Amino acid sequence: KLYKIANIPGDGIGKEVLPEGVKVLDKVGGLYGFSLDYTDLPWSCEYYVQTGSMMPENGIDILSKHDAIFLGAVGFPGVPDHVSLWGLLLPIRRQFDQYVNLRPIKLMPGMNTPLAKPGKIDFLIVRENTEGEYSDQGMILAEGTDEETVIQHSVFTRKGVDRLLKYGFELAQTREKKLDWATKSNGIYIAMPYWDGRAALMSKNYPDVATAQYHIDILSAHFVRDPARFDVVVASNLMGDILSDLGAACTGTIGVAPSANLNPEGKFPSMFEPVHGSAPDIYGQNIANPIGQIWSGAMMLEHLGEVEAAGAIMRAIEFVLSDETAPRTADMGGTATTQEMGDEVMARLS
Ligand code: NAI
Ligand code: MG
């Protein structure tokens, strides 16, 4: 079996960690009897500086000829972050209807959590990925005057909210049958009560799933104080984004956190990338943790139907992390290079 993968290393440490993901994927493919055919795409801030856009005009068309997209990170000083995000990641997520951003948070043995009483941390953040607070609708009024006013609308559609909730509930049914959702219905009093209402309505279709609504502020506090209570957490685009860095940090480092931008219907390719960004502060030192990228590769294989191979990568990751003598990158308190950590995961694949 052959899968066509579009590789976009992007910027900064994206260029360092993506090759680690690729080498693990290739090895596991050899072990489990499939291969991956990559198209390497240089779309990035550097590409923007040279061409004036983050990807070519037919970029989406090029990507659509692939089974999945494997991305490092995008964004680098010199190009405003909203230009790089809106020029590459957001068009891909939107045009391919990748409306679910699935972000597992898991404390594995050997990880250095900053929490005093972490308990078992093993939950999934289901982030809305195509609308919400990340909207291009807004304006600046009375610019340059004392009355200068900036407005940016959040946009929530019934279709957008419902399809995300449905995905969350179906996921919850395969796990602990527990779903929590984040809103801020006291402050944002039109859009968020709407969310609450849609969630309450949707929950009627899933009577076996226990639900709770939290305002985002106290939910953040519970992430730190009692993360063991969570199993599936559904949130809007911005809230899910913030919660996923927070959740990952509770396990010790955001360097391990993976994500899947899913088009659940499989009509378009899905995209797999670590949660972290391009980390310009450590780029070039080869000390970035490649686990988030490698784990994202496992999510990609699972999506492609190579469930056993995905499981093998996860076992190798857990094996490395739980072995105190194994190499660790600086974010986990060690001195290993990105490549040494990737090699270690490779060595433990079986
Ligand atoms: P960041 O995630 O790049 O870095 C935050 C901190 O975490 C830094 O101190 C960094 O060194 C550390 N870190 C991140 N990944 C790491 C890894 N794998 N191993 C070890 N340490 C790691 O977030 P920041 O600084 O807010 O953004 C930097 C750039 O990345 C910006 O241009 C931003 O727009 C972009 N970005 C891109 C994302 C994407 O491509 N999906 C997501 C988040 C940010
Ligand atoms: Mg983020």
Image: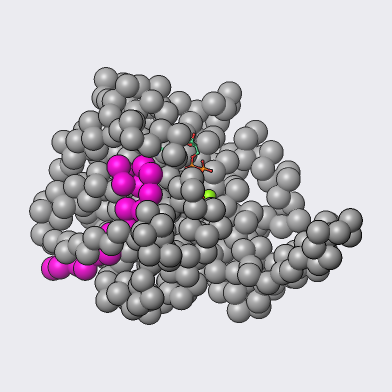
As for residue 15 lying within the magenta part, the answer is yes
Q: Is residue 195 visible?
A: no
Q: In front: 193, or 172? A: 193
What quarter of the picture does the C terminus occupy? top left
Residue range in magenta is: 1-17
Q: How many marks?
A: 0
User: Where on the picture, by quarter, is residue 339?
Assistant: top left
- Residue drawn at point x = 72 percent, y = 69 percent: 138
| 129 over 178 or under it: above or below | below
Residue in view at x 24 percent, y 47 percent: 19
Q: Residue furthest right?
A: 146
Residue at 35%, 77% in the rendered image: 58
Q: Locate residue 260, reporting x and y percent.
A: 41, 58
Q: Please provide percent x and percent y for residue 21.
A: 26, 48
If the image is split into quadrants, where does the N terminus sit?
A: bottom left
Q: Position of residue 233 (x, y in %)?
A: 58, 54
Q: Is residue 10 magenta?
A: yes
**Is the residue 206 above or below the residue 82 in the image?**
below
The one of 242 and 151 positioned closer to us in this rendering = 151
Residue 108 picture location, percent across and down: 40, 35
Q: Is residue 163 visible?
A: yes
In the rendered image, the vertical position of residue 58 relative to residue 127, given as above or below? below
**Colour scheme employed for the rendering of this structure:** one colour
Q: Is residue 81 left or right of residue 284?
A: right
User: Residue placed at 22% from the left, 51% from the top?
Assistant: 22
Q: Is residue 55 left or right of residue 314?
A: right
- In the picture, measured across the screen, residue 273 lies left or right of residue 337, that is right
